[in-house]
Image (spheres, helix red, strand yellow):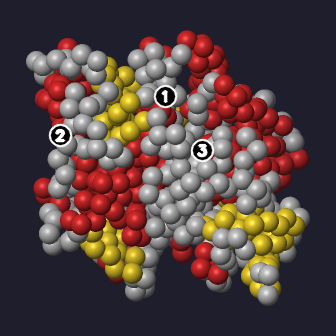
Amino acid sequence: MRLNREQEDMLSGKYGRGTQKAIEILIGLGEAQGAEELVKISYAHLMPPDVMFFPYGRQGRWAHEMTRELTMDIDRLRVTATIEPLFCDLAIAKTIQFTDDMIAEMTKIQGAASDFYERIGVIPNYSALPFYVRPGKFGEHVSIAESIAILWYNTMFGSRCERDDGVTSLSAAITGYCPLAGAHLSENRPGEVTIRLGEDLNFKQFTDADWDAFSLASSRLCREKRPVFVGIPRDIGLTDLKHLFAVIAVESGLAVMHIVGVTPEAPSLETALGGRKPQAEYVVGKKELVEAYQLANTTSDRDIDFILLGCPHLTLRELRELAEELDGKKIKDGVNLVAVTTRMLLEQARDMGYVNSIQNAGGIVSCDMCIAFAGTQVTGVIATNSIKADFFYAGFSAEGKRKVRFGSTRDCARAALTGKWEGRVP
Amino acid sequence: MKQILKGKSIKKLGTVEGEALVTTDLVAFWGGTDWETGDIVEVGHEAKGKNVEGKILVFPAGKGGAGDTFGYYYLARSGKAPKALICNRAQNTTISGALLVDTPMIYGFKEDVVKIIKSGDWVRVNSDEGEIEIIRS
């Protein structure tokens, strides 16, 4: 690996142990990727393990140990940085079934961690949608640790980032560099396969959940290959894009993809494919969409215990739809609805009256937290509008303590009122 | 019968050998695998119910959230990590996890490893040379 003078100084320990450890990590990663040099970044989005990754019990201690050496003598980051949600809003932790002991521990661990990151200058957005706070620029190199945001910066903005994890993005923010490899390089960005919608379906009739299901169905076809989507309406909104991006980011582990006519590196199909022929041409029809719904609904139980919404954080449109369904009504006794968003969107939703409508119906509205991870403590049947959250609710253990019903935001809201799942499947 | 495949090693960590666990599906360590038991638990996964502990895990590529690296770290801290990771396309999050706990990992073979290696094959992984040797009796 070629290092410049500043990087060599970092490696020699001139800037302290934290910076030295950070550059060691980046060089190690770069060599593993086959990178020949590090590239300057202009922005980082952090995912510190002790802020977000089950900060209690033994894994809470491990999370802290993972970054202890890196952060020991850091008092400022070299680039602008935002941060992932905290694990849990302590005010609602009991509702989603954490014990007093767990709450005491997470108060300490996530509290100390967030204090630290705020002290070193991180913008405390606590959001899985950092592009609302700090949009990307075409061609700039950034380091992002959040799967939907990685895919979003690369695909929507044409910024360049790899699938960086929390340790890598922190190291990048400390040093201002990351390895020049993967999606940072033009050769690793063109689409490899194409995906179209079957003639038996129409994007204009899609609910938000249909976009999730379409995304899951697409990822089961393209797997790890970068897709180019053809035929997606040019006027697709941010909410539908969020649903499309969130699922495939996790299910295919993609850093970058393309949407013809929508994303900057896809003015045409030929350009999006980098002038090559597609390795495969896939079609997602009704059959594939219904299969995705079947996979996402891990139970046929109709009695719902929890409605957990906000992975990734709810947009204003989702909050509006919730408010419209719940306004003037009451959520059924014994059913808990938790809706989570980003603080700046929560303020706007409050101004619009959405928060009042949801709260007056008996729902909880929160921000700054990760309902996908914190929601994994509940038992019973969860309803959600997110296949990404579903992946985590149904995952982590084979015991199957949590069963999941998946459907649109409106279907989830209706289930909150009746306690019964009547979700529509296309 | 012996067969040698060459790929790119993420770090020189010597040679390990063990029984292959091969899956044709992408693998997620955070959420898709139980970090306390090593079981693959993802709904609909081809290898659901299989355990990765001590195996030479052979898979097309990683997937999952950006937290997948921490999932691998927790798995390793629980003592349930595979002995080595062998894949076609290396996800950054997978490499980072392997580097955090020094699991040998080789990727980028000319051949499709999930088609060539079979579950139960004995595999020797030489991370210094970026070579794997498949040994069948």
Tag 2 and tag 1 share a subunit: yes
A281 lies above or below A291: below
Confirm or deny contact between disc 2 and disc 1 (CB under 8 A).
no
- Estimate the x, y position of residue A181 in percent, counting from the top left: 63, 65
- Hey, what amino acid is under mark 3? Asp
Instruction: Name the residue rendered at 80%, 85% in the picture.
Output: B2
Instruction: Pinpoint the chain carrying mark 1.
Output: A
- Hey, what amino acid is under mark 2? Glu
Instruction: Name the residue rendered at 81%, 70% in the picture.
Output: B125
Q: What element carries label 2?
A: loop
Mark 3, residue position: B34
Mark 1, residue position: A377
Q: Nearer the viewer, residue B52 or A88?
A: B52
Mark 2, residue position: A422
- Measured Cα–Cα span from mark 3 to mark 2: 31 Å
Q: Quadrant of residue A70?
A: top right
Instruction: Name the residue rendered at 34%, 79% in the picture.
Output: A281
Label 2: how many Cα within 10 Å (few below 14, some 14–19, many 20+): some
